[in-house]
């Protein structure tokens, strides 16, 4: 699996680095689309060229991190977030009246949706390791068992104190898990749904 990650991450990052470099070299055609899209969202953009260049820099930077395997989950989320406005601004197939252009834009749009899905998979990849919430719960359980064994060896009138401490640690681990799941759900909710 590690070899697969080393191969797929650069492959997934490549289109973002290339598109980011293209946008930095020729931002003007993209600026008009970014400005009209921002206007429709009710967020006027003072300098659409700056927005296009910033998005391009983000794509190059996050693409580079993903390709190198540095912060791959974060880089995948950043790329997924940067893909949404670029896709909507550049490949609005529903606006095209010419059937051939509409078909071409729809194809590009579908490819971007596929990339978006691949990035979400990359963001969810824990490298085969369990989540932090699972590790916290497991550590709590192991700690409780060790404490019970130590109490039994010590003659054992401390079971109630250990149960109380174990219960508090378990509650803390559960709260940590809920917080992490809530943060993940919030991040997913912030991404546009199709």
Image: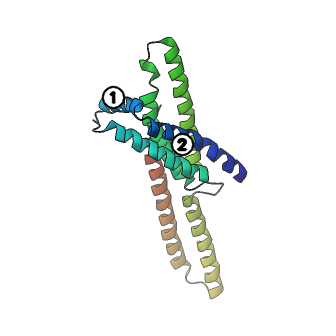
As helix, strand or loop, the secondary structure at mark 1 comes to helix
Residue 17 visible within the image: yes
Observer-nearest of 151 and 181 = 181
* The disc label shown at residue 150, or none: none
Q: Residues within 10 Å of mark 1 (few under 14, many from 20)?
A: some
**Residue under label 1:** 36
* Earlier-in-chain disc, 2 versus 1: 2
Most foreground residue, 120 or 13: 13
Q: Residue at x 58, y 44 (%)?
A: 13
Residue 190 visible:
no
Say if 89 sits above or below 74 in the image: above
From the top left corner, tell me how far across and down residue 159 is, in percent.
Answer: 56, 78
Residue identifier under label 2: 17
In the displayed structure, does residue 8 sit left or right of residue 189? Answer: right
**Residue at the front extreme of this rendering:** 25
Image-quadrant location for residue 155: bottom right
Horizontally, is 72 left or right of 94 in the view? right
Q: Nearer the viewer, mark 2 or mark 1?
A: 2
For the point 70% across and 48% down, the residue is 4
């Amino acid at each position: 699996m590690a070899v697969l990650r080393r191969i797929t991450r650069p492959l997934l990052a490549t289109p973002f680095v290339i598109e980011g470099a293209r946008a930095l070299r020729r931002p003007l055609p993209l600026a008009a689309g970014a400005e009209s899209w921002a206007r429709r969202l009710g967020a006027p953009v003072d300098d659409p060229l700056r927005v296009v260049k910033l998005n391009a820099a983000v794509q190059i930077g996050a693409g580079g991190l993903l390709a190198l395997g540095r912060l791959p989950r974060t880089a995948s989320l950043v790329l997924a977030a940067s893909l949404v406005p670029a896709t909507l601004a550049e490949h609005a197939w529903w606006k095209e009246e010419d059937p051939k252009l509409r078909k071409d834009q729809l194809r590009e749009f579908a490819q971007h949706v596929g990339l978006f899905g691949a990035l979400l998979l990359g963001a969810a990849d824990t490298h085969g390791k369990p989540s932090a919430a699972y590790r916290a719960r497991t550590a709590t359980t192991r700690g409780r068992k060790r404490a019970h064994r130590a109490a039994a060896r010590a003659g054992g009138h401390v079971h109630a104190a250990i149960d109380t401490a174990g219960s508090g640690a378990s509650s803390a681990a559960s709260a940590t898990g809920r917080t992490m799941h809530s943060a993940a759900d919030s991040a997913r909710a912030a991404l546009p749904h199709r």
